[in-house]
Every structure is written in structure tokens, then in C-alpha cells.
């Protein structure tokens, strides 16, 4: 056995997390994230032979190849503690958004939304790189840049499905303006990995914020929900959706599908987040990874400021 020696081998060996960093590095003319459907997941499609520099950069930074582990002297103080489950840590807080409207609409306390707004309005960053529901296909998600409070609020809430939050990462670095990144722990590992390749990351990415992530699911998982609640068209009813929200609007809030006529179809998720009830999960970090950067089902917020 050997470590993958190409992007194709990363994908073929089931190591791809769908983050989109490879597209950002190589450019869409060489690599483009696209749907593998069924089961409904994002994977890189190689459009033309990768140049040697791009392939080398992808192999060095892909979070499917390398996840954060040991303390990083750039991000961590000399006194940082290391936990065998959580990895490097400095301090632990318990809290939630003080703004009741944010807390109500959020999936689990609104901490990430509140911190993102604070970073913007306090002038620490000029924009936030994160994800939101696709306006045209609301079951799906896309990378998003927020430059105002309203932008951040429009993207609030969990997205239990495939998304490529880093597919434009190098373009954002090209803007030369300070920003923050919100993503799954594996996505944030991709950012930290790329910092070793491109010094602009340490200069411009002023904060990285991650949430607890035990798994993420293929689109077929969400389609199963449509079938269970009797949504028009059942599992094939995605084209009838005008809204698809996994949680929020009252903790934990229901998974909600709304059709084109405004009819609401809810499913209670109090017993567990949506992917847990699905048999088409892409990864369960508790069993497949369990390194310090991929924490299984724990109420964790990671915030590191450069």
C-alpha cells in the first residue's frame, strides 16, 4: 500500500471529502467539482491533465490526505495543551448568541453566526467565507461570501449535505483583504494545510471557525426525508422545493421542506441530526477518522485568530 500519488488516487481510494480545495488550486479549467448522483455527492472531475505544480500542491494540502494534529507554532501559544481526543486547545467556553433573534433561527445557539457578525462589524475582517443553501436548488448548498450582517444571517443554519466551501479559496486570497473561514473541521484543516503552501493564508485569514461534525450525508439522505413526510414527488421531488432547512427556528427545530405552493412538510429531529437517521452517510468521523481535527458528535466550537 502507498499514499495516493495523484488527485485521481485520492478520489478512487475514498479519501475525498468534497471540500473543493483542489478546484481552487488547479482552476476550473483543470478540475471542477461536480455531482456524482446517485447517491448525491460532490467530487472533483479532472477536465485536463493537471500540471505538476498543481498536483503537488493538492497532494500537500488536501485534507483527505492530511488532517491537523500537532500544535502549530503560528496559531498556538507555547503553553497550548494537547488532548488526545480534541487535539491542541487553549481554553474552553460555554455560550450562545446573546441576540435572541439569531439564537432562535440558528441550529444550536448561534455562536458561529454571532462571531461572524462580530468579526465583520468590528472591522477584524472584510468578509466571511462560508456556505449557504443554493437559492435555485435549496436542498443543495454552495460556497458563499458574506460582507454584511444580512448576508451572514441569510446563510445561518446547519447544512447536512455535500458542499464545497473551499472551491473559491484562492480567488478570495487574490482579493488581498482580511477574511474569516467557517467550515467543518476537515475544511478548516484544508485551510491550515494550504497555509503551509501559500503565505497569504497566514496574512489574510484572520480567523477560522469550526463546528462539531460527526458526519455529513449524501443528497439521497435528504431525499429519504421527502419520502417519509409525503412531499409531492417523494424522493424525486427535489424540483418541487422552494425551501429546505435542516434545523433552526427553535432548538433543535425541525427539518423543513416547503413546496412551490408554500405547503410545509416538517420532520422532528429532536432524536438526532438528519444524517444519523440515514443509511447513505458519506463519513462518520467517529469511526473513519477520529483524528484531532475531526471531532465526533461533541458540542465544540473552535476559534483560532491569527
Image (cartoon, rainbow, N blue to C red):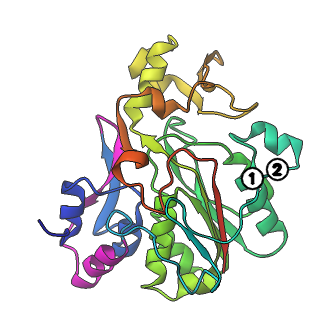
Q: Position of residue 136 (x, y in %)?
A: 53, 39
Q: Where is 42 relative to 178, above or below?
A: above
The residue wearing badge 2 is 97
Q: Farthest top residue?
A: 230
Left or right, 15 with respect to 201, comes to left
Helix, strand or loop at disc 1?
Answer: helix
Helix, strand or loop at disc 2?
Answer: loop
Q: Is residue 38 magenta?
A: yes
Asked if the residue at tag 1 contacts the one at tag 2, i.e. Cβ–Cβ closer than 8 Å, the answer is yes
> Which residue appears at 23% of the width and 80% of the height?
51
Q: Quadrant of residue 233?
A: top left
Count residues near mark 2 (Cα–Cα under 10 Å), then give few for <14, some for 14-19, many for 20+: some
| Labelled disc at residue 111 | 1
Left or right, 281 with respect to 38, comes to right
Which stretch appears magenta? 37-61
> Which residue appears at 45% of the width and 84% of the height?
196
Q: Is residue 275 magenta?
A: no
Amino acid at each position: 500500500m502507498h499514499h495516493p500519488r495523484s488527485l485521481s488516487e485520492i478520489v478512487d481510494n475514498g479519501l475525498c471529502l468534497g471540500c473543493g480545495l483542489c478546484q481552487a488550486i488547479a482552476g476550473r479549467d483543470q478540475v471542477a467539482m461536480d455531482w456524482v448522483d446517485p447517491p448525491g455527492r460532490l467530487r472533483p472531475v479532472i477536465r485536463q491533465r493537471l500540471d505538476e505544480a498543481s498536483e503537488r500542491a493538492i497532494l500537500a494540502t488536501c485534507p483527505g490526505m492530511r488532517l491537523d494534529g500537532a500544535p502549530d507554532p503560528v496559531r498556538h501559544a507555547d503553553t497550548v495543551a494537547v488532548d488526545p481526543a480534541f487535539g491542541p486547545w487553549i481554553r474552553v467556553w460555554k455560550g450562545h448568541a446573546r441576540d435572541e433573534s439569531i439564537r432562535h433561527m440558528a441550529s444550536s445557539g448561534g455562536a458561529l453566526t454571532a462571531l461572524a457578525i462580530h468579526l465583520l462589524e468590528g472591522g477584524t475582517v472584510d468578509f466571511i467565507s462560508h456556505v449557504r443553501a443554493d437559492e435555485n436548488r435549496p436542498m443543495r448548498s454552495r460556497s458563499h461570501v458574506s460582507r454584511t450582517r444580512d448576508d451572514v444571517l441569510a446563510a445561518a443554519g446547519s447544512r447536512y449535505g455535500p458542499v464545497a466551501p473551499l472551491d473559491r479559496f484562492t480567488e478570495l486570497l487574490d482579493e488581498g483583504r482580511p477574511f474569516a473561514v467557517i467550515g467543518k473541521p476537515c475544511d478548516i484543516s484544508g485551510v491550515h494545510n494550504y497555509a503551509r503552501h501559500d503565505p497569504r493564508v497566514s496574512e489574510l485569514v484572520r480567523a477560522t471557525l469550526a463546528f462539531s461534525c460527526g458526519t455529513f450525508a449524501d443528497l439521497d439522505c435528504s431525499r429519504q426525508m421527502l419520502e417519509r413526510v409525503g412531499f409531492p414527488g417523494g424522493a424525486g421531488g427535489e424540483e418541487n422545493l422552494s425551501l429546505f432547512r435542516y434545523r433552526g427556528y427553535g432548538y433543535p427545530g425541525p427539518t423543513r421542506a416547503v413546496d412551490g405552493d408554500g405547503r410545509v412538510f416538517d420532520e422532528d429531529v429532536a432524536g438526532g441530526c438528519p444524517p444519523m437517521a440515514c443509511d447513505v452517510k458519506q463519513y462518520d468521523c467517529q469511526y473513519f477518522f477520529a483524528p484531532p481535527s475531526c471531532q465526533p458528535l461533541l458540542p465544540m466550537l473552535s476559534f483560532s485568530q491569527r
